[in-house]
Image (cartoon, rainbow, N blue to C red):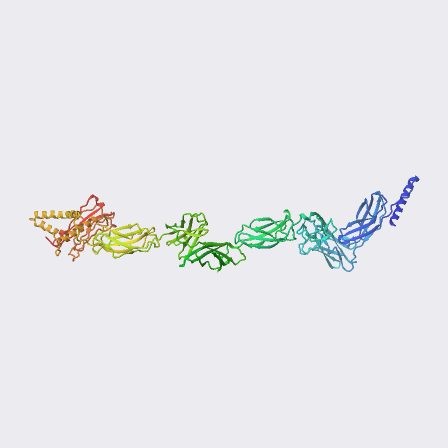
Amino acid sequence: MISFRILLINLLGFYLILFEGQSGFCSETVWQLPRPSISHLQAISDKQTLMVSWLVNHSGLAGDVYEVQIGRTENHTVIYSRNVSLLSLDSDEYTWTWTSDLPLECVDHSVRIRRFYNQSFPSPWSSWRTNCGVHAKDKTEMFPYQRVLREGTSAMFCCVPPRGLDITNITFDNNQHTPISVGARVKAITVVNLTIPQRAIKFLTLSCRDSTGKKSRVLNYVSFPPEKPRDLNCVTTDMTAVNCTWDSGREQYLYELNKQTITLHIENSDRAPINCKPSTCIFLAVPQLEEYNIRVVVKDPLGEETESYSFNISDRVRPVVEWDRVSLGVMETTVSWFVQGNLTHPNLLCQVTADPGSTTELSCNSVRGPCKAKLEHLLPSTRYSTRVRCSVNGRLWGEWTQPIPFTTCPLVTLDLWRKIKQQSDLSSRQVTLFWTPHVSGSAASTNIQGYLVQWSQEGQNWTERKDGGQTQAEFSIGPGQCDFSVQAVLRTSCTFTFTAHITIPQRDDGGIHPVEKRFSIGTASGFNLSWDKQDSATCGYTVEWCTVPCTLRWMKVPEGNNTLFLPARDFKAVCRYTFNIYGCTENGHRLLETQTGYSQEPKCVQSLSLVEPVQSTSSSVTLEWRYDVDDLAFIAGYLVKVQEVASDTQLSHVSHLFNVTVADPQRKSVTIDGLQQNQEYAFSVSALTKGGPGQPASITIRTKTNLHRPWTHMDSAHLAKILTPILLLLCCTILLWPQSKTLKWLKGIFDYPAGMNIEIPELDSYLHETSEWLQSQRVDECSSCDIEIVYTRPPLSEPTTLSVAGPLSTLPSPGSQSCLLLRDEYRPQSVTVLLGDRADLHQVPCVTNKTYFHALEEDLSEAQVRLSEIYEPSESLQESCSVEYGYISNDTV
């Protein structure tokens, strides 16, 4: 009906125009366009928006322009005006939207429109259409309130008092603002750049005080609009459900009142929009659909954002892995897992890591059972963690699983050895097994619960369990070959341990004897053992020895090596050790060599046992002894020390000392020749090692006296030397007989003390002994040339002193030994030889010559004999000192 009316009006106007052009005259009547009318006015308060609608003329006239005015308050004060061009429309009604800076509730807002023909001829204004504001009744109304405001924008706030009252003060967020008047009673303020407050609930307070002093308050909230989703990505784990994720940008606050709605739209399907969470959305895959076109829409009161994405579901598979088990090992561990969703893609790949370590990649085509991987090259007793992830095509990998920690099993090895003892019954042997457990890492041997011993002989098998504290076991076996194995049983969940094997060879009939060797000593740091290589030792060697106290020890040597160093810290320095070297063959161990030695040979060994009685002559002594050369040290020989024993009358006599060495340790006797008759000697015999002599065994022996010696040419020569001066003196005495004094003096020389009865055989023996003694004398070092003869009878009134006539060019050293010889058959007088007192003394060797003199008791003054008469200095006095002294008789001539 309305369209028909508009059509009639347009036809009438067109007719008048034509009529005016044909009449050819001027008419004073002015033609006007019809008045437009507003068909609909709608206010959206939370958005402060007015939606104005009016009817549009579809007469075919293009370029219609409408002017729209917005009036505020009851007076219709125009605050906004705009021309709107209508180019083409699909409907008969046009809607125009306007947003107010002032909340629509504050005052009345009115709208009117008019049309322009050819942009020149306006139509009359339409009537005002008004959206009424709020009229307060009993309290002041404030707008906006409980609204979410956009951060960073400006906003106007108004206070509407009841009729008859005015607003005197407006405060926003505790800050006072200067109000402006909007209409008759309404007051408003403008706040620019709204910011989110720093409090848990992001609200701002608006307070208004009226003319009565009453204060009213409302709350508003500040937030931010939604952001466009970024990095939109969709994946599936099982080709059944699709999970899309994106970056939503700025995260909303905990007590956010600006609630967002997020929806996902599958554009190429008839699925309804899917409600999503802030950053993720999960939906079921559309059957038989490979390509997906999706759109994510984020909307809230402050705005709306949209993002689109397309993908092929087969390319977006990320498998999810579920752990099955971890089977622990020593240096390798087996892990297994399931892939969720029963993915049976032929190109399924998985990656497994052992941290710290490397990554292993493998194919997993298992349809029903779990996927398995073996982590190799691990360390025993070490803590690791493992992760796994899988991929369908090797490009898009699934998420890593949570790391699973595990600790590899300790490496438990057993060093196994044996000791074989043949029983009296040749068909039975006793075997003692020894083993030493070695546990790697920080794991202690307490992790060992026990041992499992198994052995077999001649087709029969036996098994025996031992406690964890045992390290040896005894078994009785037959004469044939026997195989033993020992395995440790752990307390942990680890079930794998190495098993030690050893083979007991068949009974040895004694056809092959081992080589026996000795080495004197090792080095200061230990033993360096070596032996001849044996081609039969196909699995190496074993060196066996005993410590002190005897505890069996052994050391394995690999094949091809025939040397072994054993540090000294494991051995006592002065003990002998025997090392048995076995060669390992497939039929057992065979003893090859036995080596004996010391790490440090003892310096002191036990004393030997001398055999008594000792055989002796007047000039020799034969010593015999007993000694075990297999004692704790290697005997290199024997050392015999010989020393004269001084008698009471030879207190100042120098003891004669010499050594005799026996180089053969098997020889246990020695004869010492060249001794003096009737002389007491001290003998000591000690065993010699490279460390020195051991404890000596001592004995004192006196040589025999030889009274019936055969006359030899040497004896007659000595006797001639003695008798010649005596015969000369006798001749002189006969010729000088008339001179009694001279004869008396000679008598004093040749006379011997009263009471002595010297027989010719005794004199001969004595002279021979004296001659032999002179020949055996050696040059001694002399500490002093003072000769003191002690007279054993009661001393005379004054001692007689024999002094040196003149000064000596060289004096003896006070540190050299004395040259005093006494005979207890005589009673010599006290004679002192003074050699002066000098500091720079030299050592003077002393040679003693025995002669016989008689001193006159009646005339003691004649006993003063100058040293020049019995001792003649020479140029070689610095090197020797010759002293002659004799015995003075009690008789006178």
- Please name whichever residue, 138 or 643, is drawn nearer the observer in this view of the structure: 643
Residue 749: where, in percent of width, then height?
12, 51
Considering every residue shown, the one lying at the far top of the view is 24
In the rendered picture of this protein, how many numbered marks are placed on residues? 0
Residue 579: where, in percent of width, then height?
40, 52
Residue 4: where, in percent of width, then height?
88, 48
Considering every residue shown, the one lying at the far left of the view is 738
Q: Does residue 849 appear in this view?
A: no
Lateral position of residue 590 relative to residue 832, left or right: right
- Please name whichever residue, 65 or 508, is drawn nearer the observer in this view of the structure: 508
Lateral position of residue 10 relative to residue 624, left or right: right
Lateral position of residue 456 relative to residue 822, left or right: right
Q: Does residue 872 appear in this view?
A: yes
- Please name whichever residue, 675 or 711, is drawn nearer the observer in this view of the structure: 711
Which of the 4 image quarters holds residue 432?
bottom left
Residue 869: where, in percent of width, then height?
15, 47
Q: Write the residue at 82% across / 50% down.
A: 53
